Image (spheres, rainbow, N blue to C red):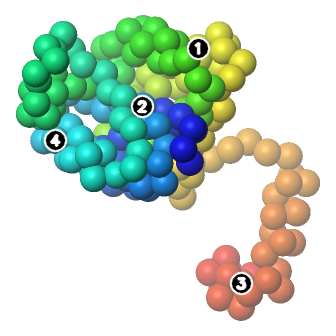
């Protein structure tokens, strides 16, 4: 994926594509909370990969800053800093795909998801070179025409006995 830029919202998420994207050589723009242990892990993964990492920092760092100083300064809270995160992402020169992989417990997940949705909506409105990715889970619901549901169910039939058993067909 050299030459491809992917913004990973919730870069530290266990189910997200952060490590795989870097392993495939992508330029990953990572956004996650300002938590030192998270950023130490993310920076370490990036250092061991053929990919490139861009991350938000909360203060200016000198050229001699090491990875520990970087981890201390890294991160952004999408709930309290959504406008700043949006403007920072607007500065990316290349076309990019933005993926939403944020997770939090309980009501905080709703707030975090809403903040990321607002950031994504603004980017899609203001830029024509942004694509969108989501990690679908069993808890996600999407409004689709009944014909799409019927086609999907028909596609499962006869495809594989294991799939049929799992779907209850």
In 3D space, how far apart are the residues under numbered discs 3 and 2 (Cα atoms)?
Answer: 39 Å
Q: Nearer the viewer, mark 3 or mark 2?
A: 2
Per the image, the residue denoted by label 2 is 29
Which label was assigned to residue 164? 3
Q: Residues within 10 Å of mark 2 (few under 14, many from 20)?
A: many
Residue under the image location 46 percent in, 9 percent down: 87
Separation of residues labelled 3 and 4 (CA atoms): 43 Å
Left or right: residue 39 versus residue 68 is right
Dividing the picture into quarters, in which one does residue 110 lie? top left
Helix or strand or loop: what does disc 2 sit on? strand
Q: Check the image and name the residue furthest to the front.
A: 64
Q: CA distance from mark 4 to mark 1?
A: 30 Å
Disc 4 is placed on an element classified as helix
Q: Which residue is mark 4?
A: 40
Q: Is residue 42 left or right of residue 21?
A: left
Determine which residue is flagged by label 1.
Answer: 122
Horizontal and vertical percent for residue 2? 54, 44
Q: Looking at the image, is mark 4 or mark 1 nearer the viewer?
A: 4
Between 151 and 122, the one nearer to me in the picture:
122
């Amino acid at each position: 994926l050299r030459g491809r830029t992917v913004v990973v919202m919730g870069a530290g998420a266990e189910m997200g594509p952060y490590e795989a994207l870097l392993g495939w050589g992508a330029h990953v723009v990572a956004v996650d909370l300002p938590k030192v242990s998270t950023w130490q892990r993310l920076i370490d993964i990036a250092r061991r990969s053929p990919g490139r990492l861009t991350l938000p920092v909360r203060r200016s760092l000198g050229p001699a800053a090491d990875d520990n100083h970087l981890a201390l300064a890294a991160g952004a809270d999408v709930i309290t800093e959504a406008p700043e995160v949006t403007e920072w992402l607007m500065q990316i020169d290349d076309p990019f795909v933005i993926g939403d992989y944020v997770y939090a417990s309980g009501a905080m997940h709703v707030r975090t998801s809403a903040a990321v949705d607002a950031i994504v909506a603004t980017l899609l409105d203001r830029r024509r070179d942004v694509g969108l990715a989501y990690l679908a889970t069993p808890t996600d619901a999407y409004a689709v025409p009944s014909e799409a549901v019927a086609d999907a169910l028909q596609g499962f039939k006869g495809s594989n006995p294991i799939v049929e058993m799992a779907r209850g067909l």
